[in-house]
Amino acid sequence: AQSVSQHNHHVILSEAASLELGCNYSYGGTVNLFWYVQYPGQHLQLLLKYFSGDPLVKGIKGFEAEFIKSKFSFNLRKPSVQWSDTAEYFCAVNGGGGSQGNLIFGKGTKLSVKP
Amino acid sequence: ETGVTQSPTHLIKTRGQQVTLRCSSQSGHNTVSWYQQALGQGPQFIFQYYREEENGRGNFPPRFSGLQFPNYSSELNVNALELDDSALYLCASSSPGRVTEAFFGQGTRLTVV
């Protein structure tokens, strides 16, 4: 069965610090990988996605993620965080051959950025 | 705004009751998925509807059921509510195609007492 593991439950950073959130998945076949963000009181929204091609993907708001197939990882990075990045971040995987919209999510990482 | 709307936003039910949650998908999207997000957890896939038929189901008991209508809106029904059903229920819609992005609504917060 597919699963997603996010290593950090809560990360606290100061503004301008660099961010890396870990994500590992368990699935043997072709996968599509996603990072979603949930700002306080708002809906889940897509930060970035990987389907195929260049393993380094860039998303909105300066976020990027690198797919490392050999490590089954898809870590999220941002060189310099802002207070407005305070939110919960979810990594998700979708088996390439499965029904679309069937996402397996990790438990999420809460990011708090101190001004 | 994603164009996916859910109603109601909050509701409180008593254990053993039944509940119906509603979702209107984004224009042009014919696939709707439902997720349960318990406190402190990531969303868990309940099931998906495509062209009015169930098209995939997660590890949820049969008392969780759904419908999709010709206009692609959808309902999630939960019978015999249990305290553990208290959660945020999310609806996501996506467009046809092999690789798609799911757009989420703001969710319905269900509290079972």
Image (tube, rainbow, N blue to C red):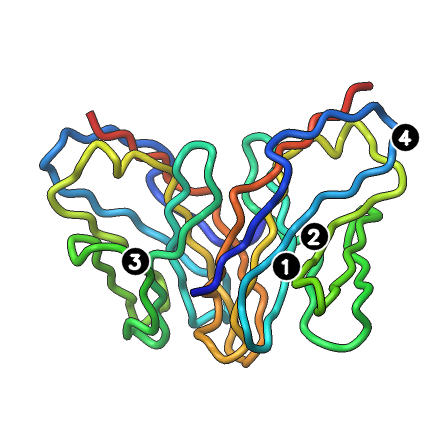
Residue A112 numbered tag:
none
Disc 2 residue type? Leu
Camera-nearest residue between B14 and A79:
A79
Spatial distance from mark 3 to mark 1, Cα to Cα? 21 Å
- Indicate which disc, 2 or 4, sits on the residue closer to the N terminus: 4
Sort mark 3 into few (<14), some (14-19) or many (20+) by Cα contacts within 10 Å. few
Q: Earlier in the sequence, mark 1 or mark 2?
A: 1
For marks 3 and 2, give the one nearer the viewer: 3
Image mark 1: chain: A
Q: Is the Cβ of the residue at disc 1 closer than 8 Å to that at disc 2?
A: yes
- Dot 2: chain letter: A
Q: Amino acid at mark 3?
A: Asn
Identify the residue under disc 4. Answer: A16
Res B70 quadrant in image: bottom left
Mark number displayed over residue A47: 2
Mark 4 or 3: in front is: 3
**Do the residues at pointers 2 and 4 share their chain?**
yes
Label 4–label 3 contact, CB within 8 A: no
- The answer to whether B96 appears left or right of A79 in the picture is left
Camera-nearest residue between B71 and B96:
B96
**Which residue is tagged 3?**
B59
Q: Mark 1 sits on what residue?
A: A34
Specify few, some or many for label 1: CA neighbours under 10 Å numbering under 14, 14-19, or 20 or more. many
Q: Residue at x 90, y 30 (%)?
A: A16
Q: Could you tell me how far apart the alpha carbons at marks 2 and 4 are, in whole angstroms?
A: 19 Å
